[in-house]
Image (tube, helix red, strand yellow):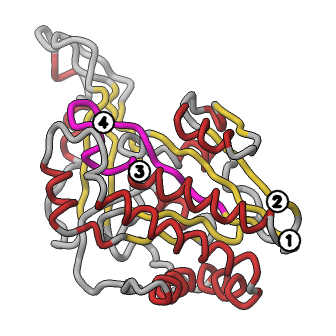
Amino acid sequence: MSILSTIVFDECYTVKCHTYGLATSFEAEFGSGGRLVVYCAEYDALPDIGHACLHNFIAASSVAAFIGLARALKGSSVEGRVRILGTPAEEALGGKIEPLQAGAFADDIAATLMLHPLASRFLPQGVMGNAGSQLIANAGAAPWNGLNALDAAVATYTSHIRPNEHINAIMEGGGIAVSIIPAKSRMVFGIQTPTWHRQRRSCSDHEFVNVMAAMGTKFIARSDKPFTASTDMGNVSYQLPASMAASALRCETARRCIKSRLQKKLPAPEAFDVAMHCAKGLALLGWKVLRDDGVATEAMRDFNEKE
């Protein structure tokens, strides 16, 4: 966080740190009036594997897009605002979920944008559940007198789902001692499915495809192939118009990163060049959202319609 917030501060923007109840989050905004575009920057290395999930790629492209769009606003008379929101710890319960619940996305936001270096379809995750009873029993003396909440938690897990659906789970709590029948248990679920209530269509996706095409890079708006990745950006997409692109770094370079147990930095210079190229596209997309009433209106219409 300190590196990213310093980069933004050095560009002469006011930076707020420790925002929305997260010790390692930050936020900065530039502009006035008009519509608001938000870039989400994921970061934080993971234990043992470092940046193997390429959160540093995401952070670099989002911060660069924010700076690019802010500079464009500085040099023009266009009304509009651009915000960078640092969202750490996406791999845990989601660095966007707590800010989402704390009101980070409560403003009248025209679009929330981000880019990931994997060509995957990202869907909501972060569903939490508790199973519990009020009957506690001694496991050695009279276990039959208790209702085992740990058994209830285990029973909730099932693998009988479709190939393009995934339920990932961990147990965070399952009792206090082996001699006591657990009265409470706690599991955290990550759910991925292409049919969770509804899928959002996104005008922003198509506009990003057009912007990148103008820069000589081919993107597709939606792939028909099933993917198995997940992100808390899916949670944001149920609150407001959100678009998450996936860069072409999904090829051999990305596979090397994901497989590496000691990946500490971007596979430079290839990944950095791709990140900066895509950041230009994100900045241009943000510019279109701020300037083009048609794009902003269509994005909101897509968000409000069921597919």
**Residue 93 location, quadrant:** top left
Residue at 77% of width from left, 67% of height from top?
73
Please rate how many residues cluster around mark 4, counting C-alpha atoms within 10 Å: few if below 14, some from 14 to 19, many from 20. Answer: some
Amino acid tagged 2: Gly
Query: For the residues carrying marks 1 and 3, which lies nearer the camera in this image?
Result: 1
Of residues 124 and 274, which is closer to you in this image? Answer: 274
User: Residue 31's mark?
Assistant: 2
* Drawn side of residue 250 relative to residue 7, left or right: left
Residue at 26% of width from left, 26% of height from top?
174
Please rate how many residues cluster around mark 2, counting C-alpha atoms within 10 Å: few if below 14, some from 14 to 19, many from 20. Answer: some
Query: For the residues carrying marks 4 and 3, which lies nearer the camera in this image?
Result: 4
**Does 257 sit above or below residue 68?**
above
**Contact, mark 1 vs mark 2 (Cβ under 8 Å):** yes
**Residue 301 location, quadrant:** bottom right
User: Residue 46's mark?
Assistant: 4
Query: For the residues carrying marks 4 and 2, which lies nearer the camera in this image?
Result: 2
**Contact, mark 3 vs mark 2 (Cβ under 8 Å):** no
Q: Secondary structure at mark 2?
A: strand
Amino acid tagged 1: Glu
User: Residue 79's mark?
Assistant: 1
Q: Secondary structure at mark 3?
A: strand
Residue named by callout 3: 127
Residue at 19% of width from left, 41% of height from top?
154
> Which residues, given as a range, are shown in magenta?
38-56
Amino acid tagged 4: Leu
Count all numbered tags in the image, as a single digit.
Answer: 4
First in sequence: mark 1 vs mark 2 = 2
**Does 246 sit above or below residue 206?**
above
Please rate how many residues cluster around mark 3, counting C-alpha atoms within 10 Å: few if below 14, some from 14 to 19, many from 20. Answer: few
Give the CA separation, mark 3 to mark 2: 35 Å
Give the CA separation, mark 1 to mark 3: 38 Å
